[in-house]
Image (tube, rainbow, N blue to C red):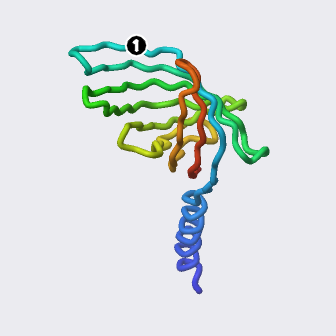
Amino acid sequence: MKLKQLSVAVPVALIVVGSGAAHAAQTINEAGALACVNDKWDVKEPEKGHKLVDYAGRYVAIPDDPAAPKRTGECVGKYEYMPDGSWKGAGTCTDTFKSGDTKIESWEEGSHLKEYPYKYTGGTGKYEGATGGGTYTMEELTDTLLGGRYKGELILR
């Protein structure tokens, strides 16, 4: 191989090898328990039986894997309750880890769902560009306390 060909081949090879490493993703399976508290549940009733709710709350996620990092989350969202008894809600949460890194997720709930879906939409530090998601269940224990479980996968870029 001539020097001129080598001077073109080596940079191209480095770009190809380097791009593969830059795009490698790490998938982490996750599952655990949730302990939640409602801080705000502001109900408006624009017409009889139709309720709109502004929600804010916090939670602690306790992974089944003792080596996995625990996290806290702060959530906001909106719910709508219809006269026929059906309801739906959606919002976002910001998860915070001891390291200070954060992860952002969106969630959806409703009477039409057995398990509620969540999706990761980014974050900071280790979680910048995070994707993935899963499902969770939730049971109301009191007016302000809830407990549940989550399972899914986190994809780190």
Q: In this orientation, which residue lies closer to the viewer: 72 or 101? A: 72
Which residue occupies the extreme right position in the image? 67
- Residue 157 visible in this rendered orientation of the protein: no
Q: In which quarter of the image is the N terminus?
A: bottom right
Q: Quadrant of residue 9?
A: bottom right
Quadrant in which residue 100 is drawn: top right
- Most foreground residue, 27 or 21: 27
Residue 8 in sight in this render: yes
Name the residue carrying label 1. 42
Q: Which residue is drawn at 44% across and 20% down?
A: 55
Nearest the eye: 54 or 143:
143
Crowd rating for badge 1 (residues with CA inside 10 Å; few <14, some 14–19, many 20+): few
Q: Position of residue 63 (x, y in %)?
A: 69, 42
Q: Is residue 78 left or right of residue 68?
A: left
Residue at (47, 45) in percent of width and height = 115
User: Residue most toward the bottom?
Assistant: 1
Give the x, y percent position of residue 11: 56, 68
Residue visible at 53% across and 79% down in the picture? 5
The outermost residue toward the left is 47
Under circle 1, the secondary element is strand
Figure check: 123 above or below 2 = above
Report x, y in % for residue 46. Answer: 23, 14
Amino acid type shown at disc 1: Asp
The answer to whether residue 71 is above or below residue 3 is above
The residue positioned 53% from the left and 42% from the top of the image is 136
